Image (tube, rainbow, N blue to C red):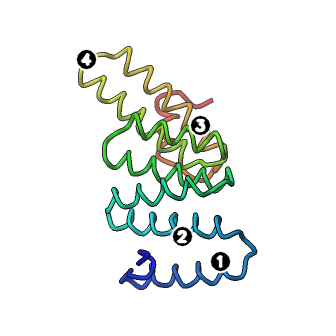
Amino acid sequence: MPRSRINGNFIDKTFSVVANILLRIIPTTSGEKEAFTYYRDGMSAQSEGNYAEALQNYYEAMRLEIDPYDRSYILYNIGLIHTSNGDHTKALEYYFRALERNPFLPQAFNNMAVICHYRGEQAIRQGDSEIAEAWFDQAAEYWKQAIALTPGNYIEAHNWLKITRRFE
């Protein structure tokens, strides 16, 4: 049974009902509908912390989905799971792949910046200030891109850029 039929909370049930109605109304192919069903089930599993199940659903959605824009969100969510699991290298790879298909994902730029900033902090703790500065510079570039796409968001990043004199 698809996950969308067994969700117990009100928000998931509401989302599933609305999504099912939209799938019936909007003209889409059966492959697109199936891809969306896997994507929706992946989001549901991810929200419950069932990352292995979410990844299975996302990979299946990727196999079926042909639209680059839709694929970008699947890739972004896969990146989120790898970030949550602490696999930052893999997360960065998926964020890059998402941005290749959709360069207007400020949240991907932000998450990449957060990972780079974290790695900079790790380098400081290890006593390597040169490496730390390189990571911080990379974080700054990603945050600038996120802020350029959504100027009112990422206030803390904007302040960090100003304080560290990395904002132009």
What residue does disc 3 label?
144
What residue does disc 4 label?
127
Q: Earlier in the sequence, mark 2 or mark 4?
A: 2
Q: Amino acid at mark 3?
A: Lys
Q: CA distance from mark 3 to mark 4?
A: 27 Å
Q: CA distance from mark 1 to mark 3?
A: 37 Å
What residue does disc 1 label?
23
Report if the CB atoms under discs 2 and 4 are less than 8 Å apart: no
The picture places residue 36, in percent across and down from the top left corner, at 58, 67
**Which quarter of the picture shows residue 19?**
bottom right
Mark 2 residue crowding within 10 angstroms, few (<14) / some (14–19) / many (20+) = many
Q: Secondary structure at mark 4?
A: loop
Q: Earlier in the sequence, mark 1 or mark 3?
A: 1
Q: Nearer the viewer, residue 143 or 56?
A: 56
Residue extending farthest right: 27
Report if the CB atoms under discs 2 and 1 are less than 8 Å apart: yes
Q: Earlier in the sequence, mark 2 or mark 1?
A: 1
Q: Amino acid at mark 2?
A: Thr
